[in-house]
Image: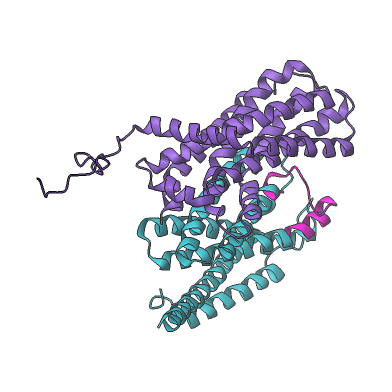
Amino acid sequence: MGKVLPIPVHMLLALGGCIATLGCVAWVAPYEIPGILHSYLIFFIHLPNAVNYLLFFILGGIFSIVYLVKRDPKWDVYAQSCFVMALVGCTAAIATGSPWAKAAWGHWWIWNDPRLLTVAISWFFLASYHMLRWSVPEPDKRARYAAVFGIVATLNVPAVHFAIRVLGSQLHPMNVTKSPEVRITVRVGLLSFFLLYLLIVRLLVRSETASRQMEECRRIVYET
Amino acid sequence: MSTMPTQPRSAPATSNRGSEEPTPIGFLAAVVEVTRRDLRREWRSRETVPSMVLFALLVLFIFSLGAQPDFGGEVTGRFGPAVLWVTLFFAASIGVHQMFAAESRDGAFTGLLAAPIDRTAIYLGKIGSCYAFSGAMTGVALAMFYLFYEPPIAGLPFLLVLVACVLFDYIAVGALLSAMTFSLRGGEVLLRLLLFPLMIPVFILAVQATEPLMRTGALPPDPVVPVGGLVGLGALYLAAGTMLFEKVVEE
């Protein structure tokens, strides 16, 4: 990917995208939407985080499957980096959604909204994944166990979605994206945050690969 | 006079010694044998089921101190399902941990893996034994729950169906995670940190389906949805566990 999109170019694109998103929020999107008021503006940061965390969660699951099949450590590095960004994105989605909930519904957290609960449960899956990685000292075992848990957690996401549907009640506003200006801002935001997430994943992959190479060198030095 | 030394009578027979191959057993027979082994060990040691039962009673008692059951009234309907299922989940986690923690002594786990049986049979056999232990614990916990909360008895048959499905789902995932965590430092806590989030959809379905049983004893509006959902989840977890167990226990 380094030849197709060098990191410096990627950085510029991601930065440009974020500036474009903020610009659209400031000058393109309407100041308020009937029934939701201007607190909805955080939606343009909240939605890209929510969509991208789920995307990278699923990517992490896919890379975990590939690692178990091919046993090449680079797939474990990709999976780990995707799950790190998924956790960051999930936290950002909750952190941006909660103030919006307080402004719009009068409460920081609602217990019977399916999307809120899905995101919260996903956060626990992701936090547990990283707890498991921290707890296993042997690299090969760590990669295997993390891949197994990553696959089970990813398979569980649709199960969560199904189970929560029985709770009923849909408080999340569904009519936000009706106007063209809002749709343009959403699309710019989605693309920009995807570029940003992908950039951070690429940097994490580089960092983790270098870290593992150092660990391997240290092991060789101590054994000889 | 013979100078040849006579062979001592205690000399071992040379015909078959060391050349007998263990008779391979079928997959189903291996599953049954692993389950029987665990049941036999539990019968001798009695280390898992009593702990699970005592812990379930303790959790139930402490929750009930806070909830103050009102004998089939609003508290039973409103809090009863959550109290019941949280109690069962917490107590069953002891049995799930013990599934493989009991093998950690004296190289028993290595011996089990070295046995000439399919490793998936170990996974299924362990599910069988843990299901039996959790079933025994649930019987006692349910009886005490009915004594404390007095929900309508008409809801009991459907509740037993739910319990059977939920325990299977719980143990199918738990077996995989227990094999991962039993040998790690802090593995007991890590098992709960991994297992409980994965069990949230099962918990939601169970609590939602149990609420009408606690209030009036009537079945939920669409009883096929929770039961079908739990059976579907069980099939998903069993399939995932069957495929992934080998990857977890490989050396």
Relative height, residue A138 to residue B249 (above, below) = below
Q: Is residue A46 left or right of residue A159?
A: right
Which one is in front, B175 or B29? B29
Which one is in front, A84 or A28? A84
Q: Position of residue A217 (x, y in %)?
A: 43, 81
Determine if the magenta segment contains residue A8.
no
Q: Is residue B110 visible?
A: yes
Q: Position of residue B152 (x, y in %)?
A: 79, 18
Relative height, residue A96 to residue B17 (above, below) = below
Question: In the rendered image of this protein, which colour is used for chain A?
Answer: cyan
Determine if the magenta segment contains residue A106.
yes
On the rendered image, what quadrant is the C terminus of chain B found in? bottom left
Relative height, residue B135 to residue B97 (above, below) = above
Picture quadrant of residue B56: top right
In the rendered structure, which segment of residues is drawn in magenta?
A96-116
Q: Is residue A166 visible?
A: no
Relative height, residue A119 to residue B68 (above, below) = below
Picture quadrant of residue A97: bottom right
Chain with purple colouring:
B
Identity of the residue furthest to the left in this view: B1
Q: Residue at x 47, y 43 (%)?
A: B240
Which colour scheme appears in the figure? by chain
Q: Main secondary structure of the magenta part?
A: helix
Q: Position of residue A56 (x, y in %)?
A: 53, 60
Identity of the residue furthest to the front in this view: B1
